[in-house]
Amino acid sequence: AQHHQQQHNLVHNQVSSSQMRIQGPASVAAPMNLALLGGGSAHTAAGVSASGLQSLRDHADRMMQQQRADAKNKEELVNQLKLKQAELQRLSTSLASQTGRNSELEAKLKQGDARTQELAQKMAQLTSLHDVLLESVHKSKRELEENKEAAAALDALAKGQDNAIQDLLGKYEALVAEKSRLAAHFEEVDARAKEARMQLAQATDREKALQADLDKSRDEVTDLGKQMEQMHSREANLESK
């Protein structure tokens, strides 16, 4: 706005100076023309002077109108440039915020992947232990069936083995329940990881869209800058005239 006011004052001063230059010599030129005409009539000399003065005034009016139009166009360009700069700042802030959210999502995704890997390892260990216990149960059952036909002296041993089998069965059922719980937890963690990946993909798309808008706004600001340079060049040409 200050630059526009300076340009307006400069144009006003130039026009006032031009009017003074036009009116000054004209007021002096009339008697001089009369003197130079010698035998010519005063009416003819005054007509020539008035015609030249009007021509200069018309030229000055055209210059003032052109400068006013250029000033108005320049003001519009300045306003557009301010709007684009504000939009550029908004897009830059939004891009920085989106980049921060993307970093948080990536960190959460890494944590989810690590937790998933840990649960997969625990499930593998439980599966291995489950197989060992199951084989031990089967072996104990076979030994019990073989010992049923044994003598009464082996009855106490059979009862002890039966208790051991029951204990092993209890442990086996507990392991099956734990395995089911871990499997459900694993599915939940895997679902959250998939959701996090989807959110990251969406956030990446939004970041690309914001980057495209930012590049477009920068191009528009560059175009406006070129238009401002052209306007300055036109003003310089008008001032030189």
Image (cartoon, rainbow, N blue to C red):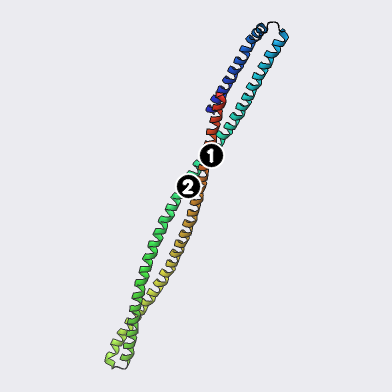
Q: Position of residue 104 (x, y in %)?
A: 42, 53
The answer to whether 188 appears left or right of 171 in the picture is right
> What residue is pinned by disc 2?
95
Between 33 and 77, which is closer to the camera in this rendering?
33
Does residue 108 appear in this view?
yes
For the point 42% across and 70% down, the residue is: 183
Q: Position of residue 68 (x, y in %)?
A: 61, 27
153 is higher (above) or lower (below) than 124: below
Query: Which image quarter is the N terminus in?
Result: top right
Query: Which image quarter is the C terminus in?
Result: top right
Does residue 82 appear in this view?
no
The three-letter amino acid code for the residue at tag 2 is: Leu
Q: Distance between the residues labelled 1 and 2?
A: 23 Å
The answer to whether 31 appears left or right of 215 in the picture is right
Q: Between disc 1 and disc 2, whose residue precedes?
A: 2
Task: Assess disc 1: are there few (<14), some (14-19) or many (≥20) residues with their C-alpha within 10 Å of its C-alpha.
Answer: few
Callout 2 secondary element: helix
Residue 223, which numbered label?
1
Q: Position of residue 152 (x, y in %)?
A: 28, 92
Quadrant of residue 61 in the image?
A: top right
Between 69 and 78, which is closer to the camera in this rendering?
69
Quadrant of residue 60 in the image?
A: top right
The three-letter amino acid code for the residue at tag 1 is: Asp
Callout 1 secondary element: helix
Q: Position of residue 125 (x, y in %)?
A: 34, 72
